[in-house]
Image: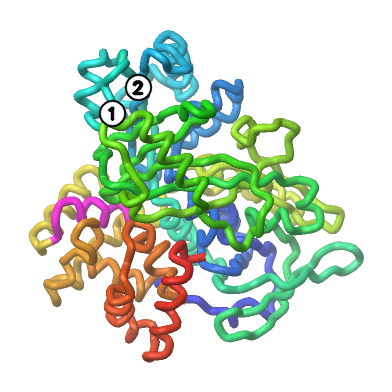
Amino acid sequence: MMKRNFSLLPDRQFDLLVCGGGIYGAWTAYDAALRGLSVAIVEQGDWAGATSSASSKLIHGGLRYLETYDFKLVRKALQERQRLLELAPHRVWPLRFGVPVYRDSRIGTLQLKAGLMLYDFLAGWPGEIMSDAGIAHRHFDHVAFSERFPALARDGLKGGFTYGDAQTDDARLVLELIAGAMSAGAVCVNYCRLTGLVEAGGQVCGATVRDLIDDKGAQILARQTVYTAGRWTSASQPGREWCRLSKGVHLVMPGTMTDEALLLTAQSDGRVFFMIPWYGMTLLGTTDNDYKGDIGQVAVEKGDIAYLLAAANQYLRTAWSEADIAGSFAGVRVMKRSGKADPSDVSRDWELKTSPNGVHYSIGGKLTSAREDAACIVDIVCGQLGVDAPCATQSRRFPWAPQEDYSGWSVAISAKANQLGVDRESAKWLIRRHGKRAGEVLCSIADDPRLADRIIPGLPLIHADLQFCARNEMVMHLADLLRRRMPLLVLATLSEDTLRRLAGTVAGTMGWDEAAVSREIETCVNHPNGE
């Protein structure tokens, strides 16, 4: 059980204070705690509450980065993709992408073939592991490609390719790492805002924080401090000089995609976008535009919607309209400052900056390569502390990964779920969401068979899962539960009646009275993205 305990922060000195509970903060805290450091990580909102739950949900090398000759970044990300597929089969699973070639495509068959051969080569293929995993690209003529992707328009279709990458649930990836950090001894507190840094002799030696749940202040003492605050780093004094922000928007559309995704190119500006299967729906995204607005209020705007729908409808046999949008979300990426005009051309590589007062700032990066980057952060922290401890995450299975053979284990758990009345698709997502803890979720169904039912008929999420998350996953607000623990708020438009029904089922667990339930519902209605 992940239990929040603000009282563990004051009156002790930590080796490392991590400020920011997204993917970079989670990996840093987890790695540092595994190396034996005393670690505190604080997050002003919920875990993965901003950009780290607003990604394209991909663990990938980034095929499009080959066009900008960013081979080093692609190779690094592809190596991490393979590592995560092996260490976390429940959390990161293979996903094949289709790339159609039309008569008027910007990139033709031969050029695309060359790019995919290079992508496979950088991933380590040909090789036994890669070929067995079905990662290598394949070519299809126009008939075979159209049969594989029937949603695509056929006029002018010359054929296409498929290639392998991988997918995850980004918010649950972060949550699992936070759970792992806690198990390794780290103190992890969400809804804890950093209010200032404490200095002695020109060097930071701690921070002041405020508990946003109980409205209490405290001082944390720490020998090293790392900012992994994402877009909020750009608001810090040194961060203004280092960061460039880009907004990415995704729309949740009907379930056009089933088991494979599409990588497409917008005809209006040549930018790459995706159609990705996601909990039975289709993720359409992303935009990539410079962002100079309020970092605390990042919204999906009319222009974002129009751009994505127009880009998609250039390829679809049956056009989508705004009425088809089930949900949407927006995030802001942090990139290193660059003179390049188009944010799509700016490198997604990462760097660590250290200010004169000793605070380390994580700048840029990708969901896929965050583990390796965090290992570099912890290496530097250990060097500063005089600690000789190697990276602990390179070959360690994820906290919730089953220890048994994954294939056999997942078949057995799925069979047990089916026997208890859980439908096959919901069982698949239950395993992906909880790993070895899926058995614990299923135990509650034996006592109450109604918990096997789906929460929303069209989505593969069951009531037993909702109850388990509320009890065990440091949920503070209804939006934490319905946006990040399970993404209901973006997969469907939930009426106030539905929200009240769901809040009522967990109110006892959460200690909410009628007034608290009403406040939580109001927040979900006004802020469906849960920020």
Q: Give the percent coordinates (x, y) of residue 405.
A: 25, 44
Q: CA distance from mark 2 to mark 1?
A: 9 Å
The amino acid on which the numbered mark 2 sits, given as a three-letter code, is Pro
For the image shown, how many numbered marks are present on the structure?
2
Q: Is residue 434 visible?
A: yes
Residues at discs 2 and 1 in contact (Cβ within 8 Å): yes
Residue indicated by mark 1: 152
Q: Residue furthest top?
A: 110
Q: Give the percent coordinates (x, y) of residue 205.
A: 79, 67
- Is residue 319 part of the magenta span, yes or no? no
Residue 6 falls in which quadrant of the image? Answer: bottom right
Give the mark toward the camera: 2 or 1. Answer: 1
Nearest to the observer: residue 157 or residue 475: 157
Nearest to the observer: residue 89 or residue 49: 49
Q: Looking at the magenta stretch, what is its main secondary structure?
A: helix
SS at badge 2:
strand
Q: Residue at x 27, y 78 (%)?
A: 501
Is residue 122 toward the left or the right of residue 412 in the image? right
The amino acid on which the numbered mark 1 sits, given as a three-letter code, is Leu
**Magenta residue span:** 422-433
Q: Is residue 70 above or below residue 284?
A: above
Q: Residues within 10 Å of mark 2 (few under 14, many from 20)?
A: many
SS at badge 1:
loop
Label at residue 100: 2
Q: Give the percent coordinates (x, y) of residue 83.
A: 44, 37
Q: Is residue 349 above or below residue 432?
A: above
Q: Residues within 10 Å of mark 1 (few under 14, many from 20)?
A: many
Label at residue 342: none
Q: Is residue 333 above or below residue 530?
A: above
Nearest to the observer: residue 287 or residue 46: 287
Nearest to the observer: residue 384 or residue 349: 349
Look at the image and tell me in which quarter the N terminus lies. Answer: bottom left
